[in-house]
Amino acid sequence: SGETQYVSMRAEVVYAHVCLSESTIDLGTIFLAVPVTRRIKLRNLTLLPSTKYRWDCAAVTELKKPNSAHFTVEVERVSRGSQDDTRFDASGTHAPLSGFEGALGPDEEVTVRIKIEAHDVGVAEGIQTRRPEQLGSAANPGILAALLPLDVDGMPVPGGLELRAKVMGLAVTYHVGSLARLEPVPDEIKGTPAALTVGVRTDWPPHLLGPDVDAPIVLDFGHRKALEKQSMTFVIRNHTGIPSSYTLNFEEFGVPAHEMIVGEIQALQAQLSATNGAERHGTANSSRGRSRGNTAARERTGTGGHTSVGGGASKTGAPPAS
């Protein structure tokens, strides 16, 4: 039955608040099936003793743009004071630090490593459909665009990362010449469309260019003598980070039948010409020889006798003519 007393109370309500060092990760140009990694930092901006977080990597598929490339993402927490992303557990063996979920202490900051790997180049859309180059080429790369959500317990507004990248498939160029003479690609244009024009021949003869070919694979030996060995160096340059194997197939192209007939006729004509020339040369030498023999015989034969041309004794008793 006493008098009611009132106590004045005042408090500050603090909710979880975690921030990221970056809100957007632009990976630039990435290549199919080649993982890339980036590191970002998470920081607890409050003095709450334990703030739980979780990266929702499974939701990336639902939060990517319709034309985006398919990809996988992995998150790992980097151990403090260590160069690698593992720590030793109680048994002394390596144990990965979980990055998908964890807890932050008061004013704590952690580093996580995000690994992304593209599995295709996406779907052409908009201006990509109007470009003549194939989707995934250096001149028409695919697009990777998605959100990676970060769920923090007690934080009213969800966090996350925006992921961006240009996805490029395999791109190779072909060159003829030694490696020492091959023009190097400057670092500032590697992985760009400009890199595919460095050292590439463009002055091809029109008969080697088809309707869809602007750089044929041709080893042009020019005019060479038959039966002489010639060599050229064929260089394949990979402009991407995609490991790739190659196979070289050599085909022998026979001479068409009509060209073989023409060649045989030409060879026969040349042989006949050589034979006729030799016969004419021999006949002329023989005629000149007979003329010189007759003249010599007349000179050696006296007015009153007869001498035969060739070996044997003369009727007059003179030595035989030589």
Image (cartoon, rainbow, N blue to C red):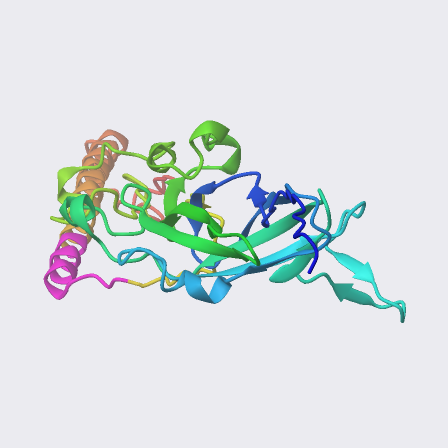
Front in this rendered view, residue 305 or 198: 198
Region of the chain picked out in magenta, as a range = 253-268
Q: Where does residue 72 sit, x and y in percent of width and height?
A: 47, 62
Front in this rendered view, residue 297 or 225: 225
Secondary structure that dominates the magenta span: helix
* 263 drawn magenta: yes
Name the image quarter holding the C terminus. Answer: top left
Q: Is residue 242 left or right of residue 320?
A: right
Q: Is residue 257 above or below residue 235?
A: below
Q: Where does residue 284 sit, x and y in percent of width and height?
A: 17, 39
Q: Is residue 260 left or right of residue 85?
A: left
Q: Quadrant of residue 280?
A: top left
Identify the residue shown where x is 47% and y is 60%: 245
Q: Where does residue 9 sit, x and y in percent of width and height?
A: 65, 45
* 190 drawn magenta: no
Q: Quadrant of residue 124?
A: bottom left
Residue 305 visible, this angle: no
Identify the residue shown where x is 30% and y is 58%: 122
Name the image quarter holding the N terminus. Answer: bottom right
